[in-house]
Image: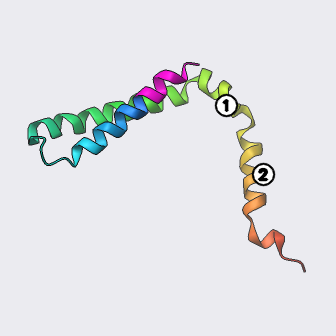
Amino acid sequence: MDLTEINSLISIRQYVINSLSNPAIDRSTVNTMNGMLILIDNKIIKMLQDESFKEYIGYKDVKKAIEEVARITNIKSGIVR
């Protein structure tokens, strides 16, 4: 899994978002960058859903992790009766 590419896309995405609010950039460029933002998001999501990334983060244990978080954050379970 190449995290460098994902990190680079996230950095580019942040630059695009910051640029969208820059009044010095003309409307045509902003429109183009809005389209790019959608494509960058799609690319990042596709990479994160890839089996190699899921294996890298141990996604097979996701149900166990969700249950553990739910148990820790369940305020009712911590109340002494």
- Relative to 33, say whether 55 is above or below: above
Give the residue at the far front of this rendering. Answer: 24
Q: Residue 30 versus residue 43: which sits nearer the camera?
A: 30
Q: Residue at x 77, y 59 (%)?
A: 72
* Residue 42 percent location from the top left of the image: 39, 32
- Relative to 70, say whether 79 is above or below: below
* Residue 37 percent location from the top left of the image: 30, 36
Q: Residue at x 71, y 49 (%)?
A: 66
Q: Which residue is drawn at 32% across and 31% down?
A: 39
Q: Quadrant of residue 14?
A: top left
Q: Is 40 displayed left or right of 5 in the figure?
A: left
What's under tag 1, amino acid-wise?
Answer: Ile
Q: What stretch is highlighted in magenta?
A: 1-8
Dot label at residue 30: none
Looking at the image, is mark 2 or mark 1 earlier in the sequence? 1
User: What's the magenta bit mostly, secondary-structure-wise?
Assistant: helix
- Relative to 70, say whether 66 is above or below: above
- Label 2 close to label 1 by CB (< 8 Å): no
Q: Residue 28 versus residue 60: which sits nearer the camera?
A: 28
Around disc 2, counting alpha carbons within 10 Å, would you say few (fewer than 14), some (14 to 19), or many (20 or more)? few
Around disc 1, counting alpha carbons within 10 Å, would you say few (fewer than 14), some (14 to 19), or many (20 or more)? few
Q: Distance between the residues labelled 2 and 1?
A: 16 Å
- Classify the position of the C terminus by image quarter: bottom right
Q: Is 20 displayed left or right of 28 in the figure?
A: right
Q: Identify residue for label 1.
A: 57
Q: SS for tag 1?
A: helix
Let me know if residue 39 is in the magenta part.
no
Q: Identify residue for label 2.
A: 68
